[in-house]
Image (cartoon, helix red, strand yellow):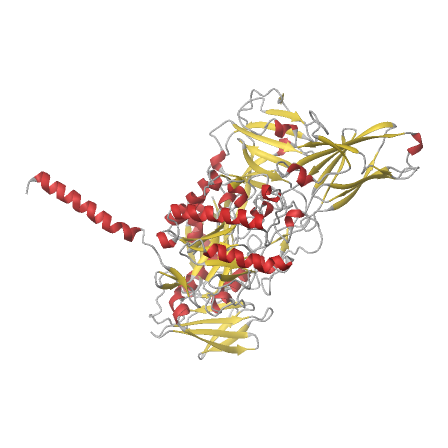
Amino acid sequence: MATSAVAGFCSALRFLLLVLLLPSLAAASNVTYDHRSLIISGRRRLLISASIHYPRSVPAMWPKLVAGAKDGGADCIETYVFWNGHETAPGQYYFEDRFDLVRFIRVVKDAGLYLILRIGPFVAAEWNFGGVPVWLHYVPGTVFRTNNEPFKSHMKSFTTYIVDMMKKEQLFASQGGNIILAQIENEYGDSGEQAYGAGGKPYAMWAASMALAQNTGVPWIMCQQYDAPDPVINTCNSFYCDQFQPNSPTKPKMWTENWPGWFQTFGEGNPHRPPEDVAFAVARFFEKGGSLQNYYVYHGGTNFGRTTGGPFITTSYDYDAPIDEYGLRRFPKWAHLRELHKSIKLCEHTLLYGNTTFLSLGPKQEADVYTGQSGGCVAFLANIDSDKDKVVTFRNRQYDLPAWSVSILPDCKNVVFNTAKVQSQTVMVDMVPESLQASKPDRWSIFREKTGIWGKNDFIRNGFVDHINTTKDSTDYLWYTTSFSVDGSHSSKGSHAVLNIDSKGHGVHAFLNNALIGSAYGNGSKSSFTAGLPINLRTGKNELALLSMTIGLQNAGPFYEWVGAGLTSVKISGLKNGTIDLSSNNWAYKIGLEGEYYSLFKPNQGSNQRWIPQSEPPKNQPLTWYKVIVDVPQGDDPVGIDMQSMGKGLAWLNGNAIGRYWPRTSSTDNRCTPNCNYRGKFSPDKCRTGCGNPTQRWYHIPRSWFHPSGNTLVVFEEKGGDPTKITFSRRVVTSACSFVSEHYPSIDLESWDKSTTNDGTATAKVQLFCPKGKNISSVKFASFGNPSGTCRSYQRGSCHHPNSLSIAEKACLNINSCTVSLSDEVFGKDICPGVTKTLAVEADCS
């Protein structure tokens, strides 16, 4: 055969092989379910998932966030679809930048993970207006989330648009994609169906029927929907779902929202759910037959944008995800859950195909045992006592069970994991400040808003209009202005007159004769408020300007779209001749701020003559815009902007909205405790920290938003602050700690083989590691004996090996990671017989 012919034949053969291989590279998966689990391509699957809400981060962050979830043991990523971000006006769609849903799903697919698509399209999610477009509220005759034709028509249209987009991109598993589940509606049966009366159940049933008619080829779910009709699967959202049962014996047990924390409200401390309790809840869920569990947490930069979040939820670095680089500060023991996931995966086949037996081991101790036909055996030993540690006997062996803990035995003999025994290290993260490095000598410019009406008023009314119905969420701000006259007969009776304001929310700044006299706000659970502000009236004409503010719209609750905002009553009391009621006055209205109208936050505003250069910006001035040119912070650590010196307002970098800032100080009541006991059921009032500190301080700025130099930072300050004290802060892992006792499980989960006999003689060990590119530079604390405390506050106990520090230094100094065994070979003769030995180590990373 001629050479050219051979070459042509080989080329054709390669092409044919490629064609033949294509189906296997993107093979369609048949996704069904039975009472045990989802069945993907004929195989039951036990799935661990993590939520990543794509618009709450930027595309440059997505690969790392997804990789972090996978490293944590996730098989799936779960996300809502945010209707109001995608359909910006009726029939006008947006899928760019942070809202590029297809791109996000492909990032997840490229990482080898499945995806759960929660279309909603109502999502709640602590997202503005629950994810429903504001414009829909103004479509005549529309009532959200009930048997209402206008709402159902728009909901169906958007759902179909999303499903068709997924089909076009072949992203459903039935097409070879990675979407294995879709969700319609969200937590409706839990809080909506009854409240909506006769329209509730028909709407829920219509939503299910409409979703099934989309023919996605994958199952549909409805979370917290107790009456979800077959074949739609009802799922659980809660702190604990081990006792949840689906509404049909043919449906699997799924947990779509495991809440690792709770939402702070301004004026309260920040609740932190202990990782031991999260692990306990997850282990109990799989022990009791669960098959899919999703951590409902946020990933990176949830403060982006003016309207992200509901009332009084403007999230920052203090509320982020445990499984990404941005959340280690809030939840430093995620690695503990990663070990839990590995342990559960060792049990997968027996859990999904075996038979289960329940055993009582004591008053509050129990075992669930799974046995397979091939001889496999898995046991969960649980101590649900919230106070007392126990030693239980199971199959003629004794097992130590701390209070409120579960031990996992993949072979019914050896404990590979206990939820209360945290063997993984704790990583400590600091916000390292950096001054705003100027790119230009005269770096500051300012613009002062006019108090009250700027330009022409938009309209005049007798009395008050509703804020939200007027602005339609196009801005946070609405000016209410009026004037009134006071003569000598109205002078006060020896005390100041008082301006009394009633408002439906969310906040107000009051200006009398162009001077700020005070501010008032609602709170996270009640947006309405009243305020009494002392004032000094002048004889003659007085000008009153009230800046009403919204801070995100309601995101959930029956008929939430009808919850209003703005002023309802304004009176002046404390006068000789009685109270002056201004409520029915002529009020002039202006929507928004002048700086917003002129887009002062946009880049390339250097030629805008409204900006006034300043060598030193004014401080403590209300209604002031600041602009400064800054350089990018050094390194590649995540960056936050520290707004502790400011009052309240908005910020942008290079035209990108960082979001609202409000470093409001929390109350100093006694609900915060220095120590948190993981034992017992978690609630939003448990394990609060940070009382008396700012509820928010650092706001994430993606590094992809920075230019190499010449970055424009714009801040609008409402109340007054010191912009010279604004700093960038790099989020840096600075230390690592470990606290391990000799009775902790010591089996290596990576290499353990159930067929290998384990005599239980392996010793526990401390493992420490620093981030890539850093080494352990010093060991600040080490004690082998009975130390106590937590990371950065360890203390020696009555038993302490004198060479603890030198042993740890020898093993760990100047390397990236190290291991120290709690063995006689390392520490020698037992210096405290009868004492259970623990090794605590704190090391610096640099």
| Residue 259 as seen in the image, left or right of residue 66 | right
461 or 347: which is nearer to us?
Answer: 461
Farthest residue to the left: give it: 1
Q: 772 and 259: which one is in front? A: 259
Is residue 193 at all visible to an observer of this figure? yes
> Which quadrant of the rendered structure holds the N terminus?
top left
Q: Is residue 801 visible?
A: no
Q: Position of residue 535 (x, y in %)?
A: 83, 35
Q: Nearer the viewer, residue 453 or 92?
A: 92
Quick check: 614 left or right of 14? Answer: right
751 relative to 273 in the view: left or right? left
Q: Residue at x 66, y 40 (%)?
A: 468
- Can you say whether 513 is above or below 205 in the image? above
Q: Position of residue 707 (x, y in %)?
A: 48, 30
Residue 711, horizontal then vertical, whole percent: 52, 29
Spot occupied by residue 502 in the image (x, y as percentages of width and height)? 77, 43
Q: Is residue 579 above or below residue 414?
A: above
Q: What residue appears at the point 67 percent right and 49 percent down from the top-left corner?
A: 524
Count every numbered label the image shows and give the total.
Answer: 0
**Side (left or right) of 528 relative to 36:** right
